[in-house]
Amino acid sequence: MLEARNLTKIYEGAQAPALDRLNLIVPAGEVFCLLGPNGAGKTTTVNLFLNFIEPTAGQALVCGIDAAVDPSAARALLAYIPEQVMLYGALTGLENLQYFTEISGAEAPRDTLLSLLAAAGLPEDAVRRPVRFYSKGMRQKVGVAIALARRAQALVLDEPTSGLDPLAANEFAALIERLRKDGMAVLMVTHDLFLAKQCGTKIGIMAQGRLASVFGADDVDHLGLERAYLDLFARAA
Amino acid sequence: MSDLALAPLAAAAPAKRRWRVMRAVAAKEWLELFRDRRLVWLCAFVVALMLAALAFGYVENARILSEREAAARADRELWVGQSAKNPHAAAHFGQYAFKPLSPLALADPGVDAYVGSAVWLEAHKQNETQFKQARDGGVGARLGSLSLAFILQTIAPLIVILMGFASFSGERESGTLKQLLSVGARPRDILAGKALALIGAIFALLAPAFIGAALALLFFVDRERLSLADQFIRLGALGAAYAAYLAGFAFLALGVSALARNSRAALVTLLAFWLANSFLAPRLATDAARAFAPTPTWQEFRAGIAQDKAKTFGHDESHPGFVAFRNETLKKYGVTRIEDLPVNFRGLALRKDDESGYAIFDRHFGALQSAFDRQDALRAAPGFLFPLLALRPISMAFAGVDSRSQFDFATSAEAHRRDIQNEVSDNIIHFAHDNTYVAGPELWRKIAAFAYRAPGADFALGYSLLPVAALLGWLALAGAFALFAARRLRPV
């Protein structure tokens, strides 16, 4: 489970908070999609859950562990897929997966890792090629395989489908749905309203560091979500 | 459960986890290093350079050794080939004491080229070593030679810096650090893994050079004169000192890389430190040591000895000291005339004068060496910050080519000179009836050839405690800095 309690971040020298008393809960088996324009505080939220930055106030909890108090323990339960999954270019997809799995402290035989890459949709002929020859979609799939290999309980995604072609984005959405069904708590930051509607069980819209509104995915259709988003945008402007 | 959760993945036992992370990081670093052909070629070039320096050192040492042995043989022939003459005249004829070359000079030539290789042993006078190669070698010799020690002290840290400067900053720039930390790896475990990889690379760099040096020792060491085991102990001590020196650079590179904003800033910072350590600190430390522990000029030194020697009587029979000694001797033997003494008075007077000189030489040469020791200590003390200042004296001490080793040789040569003086004076005392007395070749042969036995590695360790402590301080400080930097590691 992921939980933000009055989570606040004011960057050094900034006038206004980048994140202002955010409260949200993402239980197991739920995909919470955070929408919002640039500068709304979405990526700051992700970075706080990973403790890549320190909160000014409040708590980011991963399965009850405060990420600021014990970042390594919190991260051990959390998988992260950024907009660009950064891997070691000189290493193959399999070697990258093996490395990140070992680093996380998990044990996985080679056959299991190969199965995970296959399950994440990486073509078989790509597995032993250096990652510097991979497309963005292939890197994202290695990122998913890393999350699977680590058996993380929660997943944080930051613009995971940005720059992917529609087919690759659709495959990725299907992967997220399967992870949710496995009981993972998923927090996904995106600009993509269609992806949010497709994957999310809950959708939140952020503006100026605040969670302005939250919808159940079944309570709103694509058009309604777009209207709500644009209204909020217009008010903020 | 979907097909995504495949085989069960056992969580590692906490005790094993850290080691596994370290090992995985080190293996990945090695793999990347190996696949980056530029670094592999650079390391291969440095190894080739070290082996070439070692080979040159071997050839040069063999040449010097053979020259010195030939010179010592020729000098001995001259000594024993003297015609019949008064033994004291033979003492004035003199002979050389040649310093045998330390086998490990093939790795570190030390100060040998600057302090001379032979001492002229003559009556009444303790001389300094002479025949300085640097003086005869022209500008090229003064610039220094490409020795294994120079490569390890100056070029090897540069290689460690090039291998380590982007360890963290490069990962931060490429985004992999974010990915790495996001999986829950602890920064200090990542640091330990990267340090393990770098130190492994250092050992890979050092191993060929030290194996080469060990093989060279097998051929080079004169086992009748030197203990091979002692030479290997010395080589082991050198290996440990160089490993500590370079491991400190590995920690420093990792720490700077973790704290720097980007790889360029890390590289510039580390190169600035390398320049300061390699070129600036040794010169500043030498100047400071000279200022705080000055040594006399050669002229001042010799003038001081001459001033004290003037108080002894030498060959001056009107000197009050001579007159007093003559009176004491006559009284001791209960006679009133020199001619009535049962022994030769001239021999007694020579021995008395020599003994008066020994104390003077011991005092002046001892004071000079003490000043050099103080300078060495002042130079080595900041070695925990600039490790070359600590490493260089350790390297020279265990290679047997430092000023203390030179002093030990000079002391041994002086002891031999005194043996010669005592032998010829005794011969005069017991066999000369008047000033026309002459001795023959049997006396010259009776005086043994000079044979110097260098002290063991424990001698070098005994006076190297300060630089050893400074070098360990450097390693500890660099390690602590790297840990501190790892704690502050941020992926963005």
Image (tube, rainbow, N blue to C red):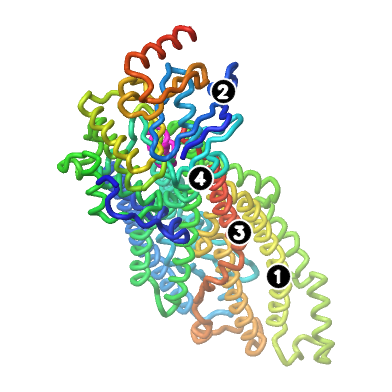
Residue B357's disc is 1
Q: Is residue B272 visible?
A: no
Kindly state the secondary structure of the residue where label 1 is placed: helix
Q: Residue at x 45, y 12 (%)?
A: A232
Q: Amino acid at mark 4?
A: Leu
How crowded is the residue under tag 4: few (<14 C-alpha within 10 Å), some, or many (20+)?
many
Q: Give the distance between the C-alpha atoms of the residues marked 1 and 3, in whole angstroms.
A: 39 Å
The kind of secondary structure the magenta stretch mainly shows is: helix
Q: Give the distance between the C-alpha atoms of the residues marked 4 and 2, in whole angstroms.
A: 40 Å
Callout 2: chain: A
- Between marks 3 and 4 in the image, the one whose residue lies nearer the viewer: 4
Q: Give the distance between the C-alpha atoms of the residues marked 2 and 1, in whole angstroms.
A: 90 Å
Which residue carries the number 4 mark?
A: B252
The magenta stretch is B165-181
- Between marks 1 and 3 in the image, the one whose residue lies nearer the viewer: 3
Q: Does the segment drawn in magenta span residue B177?
A: yes
Kindly state the secondary structure of the residue where label 3 is placed: helix
Q: Earlier in the sequence, mark 1 or mark 3?
A: 1
Q: Residue at x 55, y 57 (%)?
A: B393
Q: Position of residue B247 (x, y in %)?
A: 47, 53
Is residue B22 left or right of B129 when viewed as pictured? left
How crowded is the residue under tag 2: few (<14 C-alpha within 10 Å), some, or many (20+)?
many
Q: Earlier in the sequence, mark 1 or mark 4?
A: 4
Kindly state the secondary structure of the residue where label 2 is placed: strand
Which residue carries the number 3 mark?
A: B469
Is residue A192 left or right of B117 when viewed as pictured? left
Residue A20's disc is 2
Q: Give the distance between the C-alpha atoms of the residues marked 3 and 2, in whole angstroms.
A: 54 Å
